Amino acid sequence: MAQIKLQADGLNLADTFAFSGTVTGAGGGTSWQSVVTGSTMTAVAGNGYPINTTSNACTVTLPAGSVGDTVELVDYAGTWDTNAVTLTANGSEKIEGATTDVVADAEREGIRLVYVDATQGWIVATAANEGTSAVATEYDTDFLVIAGGGQGGDQHGGGGGAGGYRNSYNSETSGRGSSSETAFKALKNTVYTITVGGGGGGAGHPGSANDGADGSDSSIAGSNITTITSTGGGGGAGHGDGGATGENGGCGGGSGLTGVGGDGVAAQGYDGGDNQGTGYSSWPNCGSGGGGAGAAGGDGDANADGNDNGWGGTGLASSITGSSVVRGGGGGGGSHDPHTPATGSDNLGAAGGGGNGGLGNSGSPDATNGVDGKGGGGGGSNGQTRPCGDGGDGVIILRMATVDYSGTTTGSPAVTTDGSDTILNFTGSGSYTG
């Protein structure tokens, strides 16, 4: 028999309360373990774990449960809001009735999980500092992120490079022949900022035989993911610097009269084309093509006869919206009188939104712009007074299961469905809340 003695205002209340049994510590039977600092751990029923995520996030695998088993977790350093704790079930067991992982991401959070049965699995019995929910569900979200294309170069300049191309959907190829990326885990109640890069240019002409302007980056940013960024396409080389080098970018800009194309970014896009001519004096007056997501830009004067402007590099096809669309084509190089080859109007990058290079100093025809929403490179101009093709604006497309879609967006993306999935097509900046 144990006694609880209360002393108040000088009154001895001994023997007022009595009970039999074992008095346990403040943990209520929980066996508290040493502070966890690793990125993974496997919990044991009956244990409690202070988890320190100062340096990294942590994934906790819950044990195979028996009815009444408990596991307790606490935020040791107040950093779960920065580096969250992900809970994953053992084998095919469930957490709160589902087989998906859940995340605890509130500062100074503490949770007590209880195993109830095979239908619900582990559930949160009590929690502190949890905000609106102690744990939140993550779900796969596929993406296509294309940056703005580069502007074509001035005066029989190189074509602009397409915007960088990153894709995770359905194992489709990403830019520069790279493997499909991994879908990101969207977290409920988390805001994902969508930034769609604009195409280079805007005024139609860089002036003074200059290189074309680079496109702007596109990105997806959120507190629980590494920012997904595609780099703006490189501008095509102009006549003012001898046409030596196209600008670097997601896909590289094409060279002008001589020299090499700009470099593309690994896993995003190919290089711009080089020029095979020997210089202005022998009339190799054709620019090279800008790089595309699917191929490098074509070389100017490939036959060394001064009569071949370079095609823009081809784009890539994706069915993330439910139908196959080619995007990320490079701009074609421009040519000067007296050379007006037909190849400029047949730019290989055109199917992916790349602009055609201008043909002939008299403006027959002028360069065309890259296509907005495809991140195509602009065509190189034909003559010194003729306009360059502007780069096309980029695009960001998200695809997720309709049952997970929150319906909360800004920036007015086009919202469509395909089978059991919802697709968000952002042609301008905005946000999506998981």
Image (cartoon, rainbow, N blue to C red):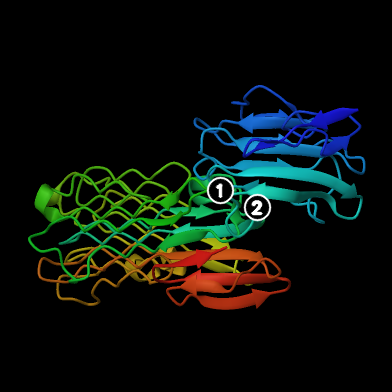
Q: Secondary structure at mark 1?
A: loop
Can residue 371 be seen here?
yes
The residue depicted at 56 percent of the width and 64 percent of the height is 398
- Residues 398 and 363: in front is 398
Mark pair 2, 1: CA separation? 8 Å
* Residue 210 quadrant: bottom left
Q: Name the N-terminal-most of marks 2 and 1.
A: 1
Q: Does residue 134 appear left or right of residue 52 in this picture?
A: right
* Numbered label attached to residue 205: none
Can residue 315 be seen here?
no
Residue type at mark 2: give it. Ala
> Split into 4 quadrants, where in the image is the N terminus?
top right
- Residues 26 and 347: in front is 26
* Residue 87: percent from left, percent from top: 70, 43
- Residues 377 and 281: in front is 377
- Residues 30 and 285: in front is 30
Q: Secondary structure at mark 2?
A: loop
Residue type at mark 1: give it. Ala
The residue depicted at 22 percent of the width and 77 percent of the height is 364
> Split into 4 quadrants, where in the image is the C terminus?
bottom right
Identify whether 44 is placed above or below 195.
above
* Numbered label attached to residue 134: 2
Q: Does residue 116 appear left or right of residue 76 in this picture?
A: right
* Numbered label attached to residue 106: 1
Q: Residues within 10 Å of mark 1 (few under 14, many from 20)?
A: many
* Residue 162 quadrant: bottom left
* Residue 45: percent from left, percent from top: 83, 33
Decide: marks 2, 1 in contact (CB < 8 A)? yes
Identify whether 11 is placed above or below 32.
below
Q: Residues within 10 Å of mark 2 (few under 14, many from 20)?
A: many
The residue depicted at 14 percent of the width and 63 percent of the height is 206
